[in-house]
């Protein structure tokens, strides 16, 4: 009987000892955890208004050059490197073979199968067009033509669409010459949609080619 009583007493004491380790945490016992009454804590939660999210440009590439080229690529081909349209224009940025030849590319099969080559071609053409249009960029940058604010990135995008000649016609005519491509898209639309992107890093080069 004594042994049984001692056994249960031992169990109770053990449980009581272990229980002391699970006392509720009280931050008031730790001065380092407290804040002064004059201090405030701010938490910013996602907005409950759906209208705050309609203009987000996921994945947040913004107006940087990467956003510029991806926006043009999506407009031209939905970003598809293998795209060939009904007029024979090739790749993500829809190059014509005559344009490709001006930057040193003559193999259409190699071009359509090489995303790397297509990206290089896009930059090379921007460099070439920037050199050809440098005087127009300097003259018209920041001005309003046919309701569109002219920027360097808009001019270069329009040149990619319709060529430098179409851009010159549009600007020289104060927007009266709309200069559309075969699908009806105007250089004005490209100047508007692709304005204010970061293209300062593109070096103007007369004989830009893809190596």
Image (cartoon, rainbow, N blue to C red):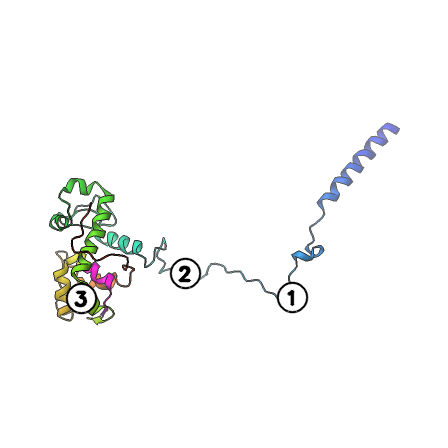
Q: Secondary structure at mark 2?
A: helix
Q: Quadrant of residue 112?
A: top left
Measure how far apart labels 3 and 1 are at the Cα level: 62 Å
Instruction: Reply above or below: 86 against 130.
Output: above
Depth check: give the residue in front, 112 or 99. Answer: 99
Q: Which residue position holds label 3?
A: 136
Q: Could you tell me which secondary element the residue under label 1 belongs to?
A: loop
> Disc 1 versus disc 2: distance between alpha carbons?
35 Å
Between marks 1 and 2 in the image, the one whose residue lies nearer the viewer: 1
In the drawing, does residue 123 fall left or right of residue 16? left
Picture quadrant where residue 157 is located:
bottom left
Q: Work out how far the residue at label 2 is from the one at label 3, CA to CA, in angstroms.
A: 42 Å
Figure quadrant of the N terminus: top right
- Tag 3, which secondary structure? helix
Q: Which mark is residue 37?
A: 1
Q: Is residue 155 magenta?
A: yes
Specify whether 49 is left or right of 175.
right
Q: Which residue is mark 2?
A: 50
Residue 106 is situated, as x and y percent measured from the top left of the image, at: 13, 44
Front-most of residues 45 and 175: 175
Q: Is residue 8 left or right of residue 55?
A: right
Q: Nearer the viewer, residue 38 or 103?
A: 103
**Range of residues picked out in magenta:** 148-158
Q: Nearer the viewer, mark 2 or mark 3?
A: 3
- The x, y position of residue 61, in whole percent, is 34, 55
First in sequence: mark 3 or mark 1?
A: 1
Badge 3 local density, few (<14 within 10 Å), some, or many (20+)?
A: some
| Residue contact at pointers 3 and 1, CB within 8 angstroms | no
Q: Which of marks 2 and 1 precedes in the sequence?
A: 1
Compare marks 2 and 3 and give the one earlier in the sequence: 2
Which of the image's four quarters has the C terminus? top left
């Amino acid at each position: 009987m004594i042994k049984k009583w001692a056994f249960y007493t031992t169990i109770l004491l053990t449980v009581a000892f272990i229980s002391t380790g699970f006392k509720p945490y009280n931050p008031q016992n730790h001065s380092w955890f407290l804040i002064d009454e004059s201090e405030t804590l701010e938490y910013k939660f996602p907005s409950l208004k759906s209208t705050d999210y309609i203009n987000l440009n996921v994945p947040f590439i913004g107006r940087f050059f990467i956003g510029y080229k991806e926006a043009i690529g999506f407009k031209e081909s939905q970003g598809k490197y293998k795209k060939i349209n009904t007029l024979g224009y090739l790749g993500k940025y829809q190059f014509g073979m005559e344009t490709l030849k001006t930057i040193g590319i003559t193999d259409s099969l190699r071009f359509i199968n090489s995303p790397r080559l297509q990206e290089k071609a896009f930059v090379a053409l921007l460099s070439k067009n920037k050199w050809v249009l440098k005087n127009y960029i300097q003259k018209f940058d920041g001005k309003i033509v046919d309701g569109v604010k002219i920027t360097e990135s808009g001019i270069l995008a329009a040149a990619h669409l319709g060529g430098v000649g179409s851009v010159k016609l549009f600007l020289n005519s104060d927007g009266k010459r709309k200069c559309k491509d075969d699908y009806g898209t105007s250089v004005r639309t490209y100047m508007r949609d692709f304005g204010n992107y970061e293209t300062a890093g593109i070096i103007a080069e007369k004989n830009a080619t893809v190596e």
